RNA sequence: GGGGAUGUGGUGUAGCCUGGUUUAACACACUGCCCUGUCAAGGCAGAGACCGCGGGUUCAAAUCCCGUCGUCCCCGCCA
């Protein structure tokens, strides 16, 4: 029997027609005299009715079990009155079976294939092919396809060329750990899997391709999180003869198109913009979730001479004091607040100061140290109402920013302050060009060392602290969707940057000399952006983890329970590669 | 490298704090029988777990303690 239709696509206009559908037995309801089967394929479910008239077929139908693979020829008809199921897209019709073929049977399943039952992720990953049969997954991957397809459509229309860059490439010194691939022919030498096609896409600009994109697989040998896998896909874009605004406009248009196609949603462009400095001050994060308020305010000036020595001494040591107001937070118990303290401890904060504002006044672990005017100023700055809770952190800048930023998010989530139906896009701009690395005692590029400074001509070692980069991150609902920059296209500027970063000529030449050399042969001004496709899809599908958008992801311990990777390899394989194993423990 | 949560029939959970009325409970799935309009079908019957693993405390451990392993979340890390 040749399939003529997908289950979920059959509609009333097929009533009276004979069709053939194929799929998996999703559920069966055997009434003795009549058997109903919900047949599932990737399009959805269709109810099949087996009637006892055809004795031979009915007997086979009685023995159907979950996940048997069958094909059915039948007659589409309207369901009898009062048996219409409005929860199904095919709920007002059904297929009366004429012919049944069992194409394969199935063992009893290790878990139910249902969107209603939550199974441990470990088991789901081991039997990923069963997990992926769940309707929600089928939906997710249809959506992912729609999204990447629309990205391609859009960029093609805009005149971009899709060009592939190599997976087997050169290890780069900075950034994430590389995955290394031993070279058989050059024994002792290694390829590296790309962390991103960064250098190659810049070289494609120098090569004159003008507009490039790629849905590029990238690899980073770092620890995993809900939104991080060691291999992931990014929408990688690079353009010549453009400025920051051009790249940002393109990304806005692209995302607007994607959201229109994926969710039929009109998102507002251009997106709001916030400077990096402002984002860190108001939200304690370089990827602010602006779906709720609870903004952070700085009180370093106010508490400079505070009698509360934790505050004043923190400021004296070059630190800061910041706080935020939790609406209706006065109802938090002492132990809940202790929980917050423990939470900010993880970010290096030593303690959390708090004040409950109620009708009967201010209650606090520290209020006795405060002057009335000080509390008054805080109350008006933070717009505090009776019943609210104010919390402060005093410490070095980074700890305060991170601690309060994380606490703001945690409380926003736990108190249900976040509207899950909102999509808040935001550009974070005016990043610092470099960051002082206390441990290594040297400057580090905040983005990467090929990022153009905003004022290249006046940049010196002395004023680099204030230097901003032509870099931009696009943030959606508190998730960093992507980022990019205008690149340095002039060799002398690139040299100046590398000099400030303390990268010697030899090291630069060894690590990415091919890019530096290419810059000397007529490199056009260029810039680009890279967006995390997995994250974008997860946000659109409202999934908490990108693993729900990746067919075969790894566990947090970087294992694939399905294939069992990673595994040890044959001695013969090692020998061919000229390698000998010595497990080093230190 | 560190912190937290968690692990109980095939699946999801309860029981654990406060050890013994536990022959480890419930739901779903599964098996058999009944049933001609169900749709997360229903009824009846049944099978299925030495409670992640190892050790300890105790007359007695799913329950308390120590260790270990897996999974998840987070910090570090991710230019």
Image: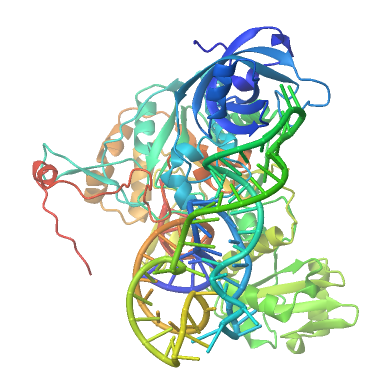
Farthest-out residue, top: A17
Q: How many marks?
A: 0
Which picture quadrant has residue A353? bottom right
* Residue A377 in picture, x, y percent from top left: 81, 74
Q: Is residue A512 visible?
A: yes
Q: Is residue A346 left or right of residue B77?
A: right
Colour approach in the figure: rainbow
At horizontal 30% and vertical 41% (from top left) the residue drawn is: A193
Residue A103 screen position, x and y as percent:
45, 22
Residue A130 coordinates in the image, percent (x, y): 48, 38
- Measuring from the top left, give residue A471's x and y in whole percent: 52, 44
Horizontally, is B78 left or right of A511 in the view? Answer: right
Q: Quadrant of residue A407?
A: bottom right
- Which residue is depicted at the point 61% across and 29% down? A258
Picture residue at 69% right of the left edge, 10% below the top:
A14
Q: Residue at x 45, y 41 (%)?
A: A128
In the rendered view, would you say A257 is above or below A505?
above
* Residue in front for this viewpoint, A178 or A58: A58
Give B57 or B64, whichever is nearer the viewer.
Answer: B57
Q: Please give left or right for residue A247 compared with residue A224 in the image.
A: right
Vertical relation: B74 (above or below) A349: above
Picture layout, residue A489 above or below residue A178: above
Q: Is residue A245 visible?
A: no
A437 up-or-down from A379: above or below: above
In this rendered view, identify the residue nearer to me: A258 or A396: A258
Judge from the rendering whether residue A87 lies leftward or rightward of residue A312; answer left or right.
right
Image quadrant occupied by the C terminus of chain A = bottom left
């Amino acid at each position: 029997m040749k399939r003529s239709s997908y289950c979920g696509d059959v509609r009333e206009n097929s009533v009276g027609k004979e069709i053939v559908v194929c799929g998996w037995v999703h559920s069966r309801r055997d009434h003795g005299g009549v058997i109903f089967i919900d047949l599932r394929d990737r399009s959805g479910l269709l109810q099949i009715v087996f009637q006892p008239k055809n004795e031979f077929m009915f007997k086979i139908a009685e023995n159907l079990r979950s996940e048997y693979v069958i094909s059915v020829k039948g007659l589409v008809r309207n369901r009898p009155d009062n048996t219409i199921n409005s929860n199904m897209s095919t709920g007002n019709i059904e297929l009366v079976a004429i012919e049944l073929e069992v194409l394969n049977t199935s063992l009893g399943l290790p878990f139910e294939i249902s969107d209603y039952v939550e199974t441990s992720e470990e088991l789901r990953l081991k039997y990923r092919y069963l997990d992926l049969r769940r309707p929600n997954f089928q939906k997710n991957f249809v959506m992912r396809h729609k999204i990447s397809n629309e990205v391609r459509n859009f960029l093609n229309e805009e005149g971009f060329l899709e060009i592939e860059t190599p997976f087997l490439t050169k290890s780069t010194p900075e950034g994430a750990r590389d995955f290394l691939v031993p070279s058989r022919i050059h024994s002792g030498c290694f390829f590296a899997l790309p962390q991103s096609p960064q250098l190659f896409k810049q070289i494609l600009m120098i090569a004159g391709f003008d507009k490039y994109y790629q849905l590029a697989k990238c690899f980073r040998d770092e620890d995993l999180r809900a939104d991080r896998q060691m291999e992931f896909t990014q929408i990688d874009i690079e353009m010549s003869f453009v400025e920051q605004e051009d790249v940002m406009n393109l990304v806005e248009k692209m995302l607007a198109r994607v959201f229109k196609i994926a969710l039929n949603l009109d998102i507002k462009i251009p997106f709001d913009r916030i400077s990096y400095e402002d984002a860190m001050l108001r939200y304690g994060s370089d990827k602010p979730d602006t779906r709720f308020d609870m903004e952070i305010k700085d009180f370093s000036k106010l508490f400079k001479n505070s009698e509360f020595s934790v505050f004043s001494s923190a400021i004296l040591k070059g630190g800061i004091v910041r706080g935020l107001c939790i609406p209706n937070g006065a109802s938090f118990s002492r132990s809940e607040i202790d929980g917050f303290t423990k939470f900010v401890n993880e970010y290096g904060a030593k303690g959390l100061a708090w004040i409950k504002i109620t009708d009967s006044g201010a209650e606090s672990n520290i209020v006795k140290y405060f002057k009335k005017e000080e509390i008054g100023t805080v109350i008006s700055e933070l717009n505090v109402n009776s019943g609210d809770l104010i919390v402060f952190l005093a410490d070095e800048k980074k700890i305060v920013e991170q601690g309060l930023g994380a606490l703001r998010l945690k409380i926003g989530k736990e108190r249900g302050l976040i509207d899950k139906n909102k999509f808040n896009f935001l550009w974070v701009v005016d990043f610092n060009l470099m960051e002082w690395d206390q441990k290594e005692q040297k400057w580090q590029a905040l983005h990467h060392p090929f990022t153009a400074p905003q004022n290249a001509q006046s940049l010196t070692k002395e004023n680099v602290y204030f230097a901003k980069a032509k870099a931009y991150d696009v943030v959606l609902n508190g998730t960093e969707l992507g980022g990019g920059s205008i690149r340095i296209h002039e060799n002398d500027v690139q040299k100046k940057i590398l000099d400030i970063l303390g990268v010697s000529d030899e090291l630069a030449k060894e690590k990415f000399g091919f890019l530096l050399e290419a810059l000397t042969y007529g490199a056009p001004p260029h810039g680009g952006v890279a967006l995390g496709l997995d994250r974008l899809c997860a946000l659109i599908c409202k999934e908490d983890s990108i693993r729900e958008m990746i067919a075969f992801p790894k566990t947090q311990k970087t294992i694939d329970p399905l294939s069992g990777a990673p595994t040890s390899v044959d001695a013969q394989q090692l020998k061919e590669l000229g390698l000998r194993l010595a497990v080093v423990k230190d």
